Amino acid sequence: MKIASTIAYLSAALVAFANAQQVRTNTLKSTPPFHPKPVPPRDAPPKAPRLCSTPTGAGPTTSADPPTATLATFGIPLCVLTQPRALPTAPYGTYGITTSGNQVSLKLVTVGPYSTNVGSRIYLLEDDNNYKLYKLLNQEFTFDVDVSQLPCGLNGALYFVQMDKDGGKSKYPTNKAGAAYGTGYCDAQCPHDIKFINGEANVNSWVPSTTDPNAGTGAYGSCCTEMDIWESNTISQAYTSHPCTVTSQTRCSSATQCGDDATGNRFDGVCDKDGCDFNPYRYNNHNFYGPGSSFAVDSIKPLTVVTQFITDDNTANGNLVQIKRYYVQNGVAIDSPNINWSGIDPLNYLTDTVCNEAKTLFGDNNQHKAKGGLTALGNALKNGVVLTISLWTDHAAKSLWLDSTYPTNKSATIPGVGRGTCSITSGVPSEVQSQYPSATVKHSNIRIGDLGTTTGGVKPPTTSAPTTAPTTSTSAPTTTKTTPAPTTSTSAPTTAPTTTKATPAPTTSTSAPTTSKATPAPTTSTAAPTTTASSAGSVGAYGQCGGGSYTGPTTCVAGYTSTTIRNGTRNASPTKWPKIHESIAYVHPMNFFCRNCLNGNFGSHGRAESLHNIWEKR
């Protein structure tokens, strides 16, 4: 199976936006294979093998093997020509995208001979011309992930969006590219930085970004329902429901319809941009997820993420009423912690009631309910959604909504404000990109199946009612960890996969990732930087613990020590430096970048360089 790639370039002399979305006639470049793992229904008989198409140069495979998938890219800007735009192909290594068996890796910065690429986004396809549509109701979606190299400010995301199966090719005659070239993207942020929408170039009223030299916004946005399965780094993670009132990919053309932040219309658009999220830290469980063995889920180690979509009648035709999550790490199933705020039902999964109560307690605008809640989301999941994987930095809000105190001018002790331990000065894209160019997220063993079938011998944890009342402060949270029947593997079942072929097709900028996703409107802080302290009065991983005008706690949690970084600020740094690139170099995940890191060359001393000084392992 093969896929095309597209790249385009922006010029100051933009021409009419109605030019068609064409493709070049040269041969598409072969792409790296990727093997997701479909899971057969419970008690299903084995399927007879059949031939399926394969990448260029590969032999035929049967359905007894993992279906082969390949990657392609869709670029950001567009060629300014008097002829209809042609979408050229490109090598995938240029975009930091690599595969190995059933694993796909996305690297933050890739330096090429003519350009530097930052971030990427990929989609899964069913065949050469169509995206794979996942129907998630009464199913569980499972994958393995390694986020150990993602510090504050980065977001390694895996999510579903209601894109057209063919990328809009049949709907819009001027779209000659289609899914093979990664066209038709949309999400609940109604992004304006998509360069082709509905088969037309989005150049009308184009305004370059003030923070990203390779991005900008056009007059149109591209909206659709979105389900964020996993937005994450080593500090925080969340899953989020984003319903919309539109039922398919829709081009918005006004600030009101698009819900533009810049004009104060965030809550007027067709989609719920904030969404209803389940972030364990935000729900006052500060010891559940993070770097190190002191957390119930250790973000430095690979883990398996299981998300279940429960309907009111336990069928794929019912209404979505619950979204549940549990994890598998070291062969042990770990349940999500119960919500630990008074005023919200102490459950460990999302329901419309939980969403409504959280919006009230947190003081957030309840657009989730206004846009139809889980029922509206469920309708999209019933009809089919496209799997998307991305790695990006946030030019709008620096990912503070994911891993820090947000809004930044409020106390982290206020319910809903604290989302993680990262400093409110963290997440600046230029700093993240320069300090962590080799940051990489790895996804593998992607599978979907009936409830309880995707984790092999590891049984789902049994959820029980909480035995203690939730709190209204950041007191010691409670987590739930259940040990299932012993197992020797956390990999996917070895049963024969279904005959459906699957193929990720990435879209990426030649320099910067696409529009910020799931980002609430940023709030300017006038207060001194602060960090969230742990329940015992100690500063958590990578949080600020001294320097400047800081007046908060100065004691670090176990495994971390106070370390001076840039501008005299002191942060809680790991006592043991994380090892990277299997070399002898140990680099602070917040404050250092590797010298010659891209080539894996650290010299004879394993040297790492900070903004102001050199640290060497002795």
Image: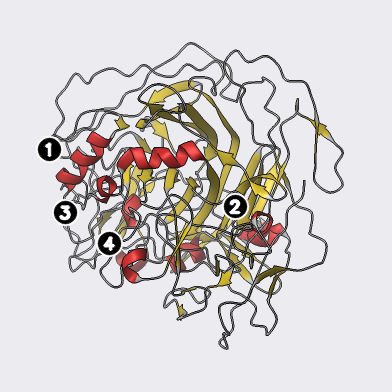
Neighbour tally class for label 2: few under 14, some 14-19, many 20 plus, Cα within 10 Å: many
Which residue is identified by label 3? 411
Of residue 15 and residue 120, the one placed in the foreground of this image is: 15
How much space separates mark 2 and mark 3, taking CA atoms? 37 Å
Which residue is identified by label 4? 268
What type is the residue that disc 2 sits on?
Answer: Ile
What type is the residue that disc 3 sits on?
Answer: Ser
Q: How many marks?
A: 4
Q: Position of residue 419 (x, y in %)?
A: 29, 47
Which residue is identified by label 2? 122
What type is the residue that disc 1 sits on?
Answer: Thr
Neighbour tally class for label 3: few under 14, some 14-19, many 20 plus, Cα within 10 Å: some
Q: Residue at x 64, y 40 (%)?
A: 103
What type is the residue that disc 4 sits on?
Answer: Asp
Neighbour tally class for label 4: few under 14, some 14-19, many 20 plus, Cα within 10 Å: some
Q: Position of residue 472 (x, y in %)?
A: 12, 37
How much space separates mark 3 and mark 4, taking CA atoms? 28 Å
Callout in the foreground (1, 2):
2
Kindly indicate whether the residue at mark 4 contacts the one at mark 1 (C-beta within 8 angstroms).
Answer: no
Left or right of 437 in this view: 505: right
Q: Position of residue 21 (x, y in %)?
A: 65, 69
Looking at the rendered structure, the secondary structure element under dot 4 is loop
Sooner in the amino-acid sequence: mark 3 or mark 1: 3
Which residue is identified by label 1? 472
Q: Is 123 drawn above or below residue 100 in the view shown?
A: below
Of residue 192 and residue 334, the one placed in the foreground of this image is: 192
Looking at the rendered structure, the secondary structure element under dot 3 is loop
Kindly indicate whether the residue at mark 2 contacts the one at mark 4 (C-beta within 8 angstroms).
Answer: no
Looking at the rendered structure, the secondary structure element under dot 2 is strand
- Asked if residue 245 shows in the view, the reply is yes
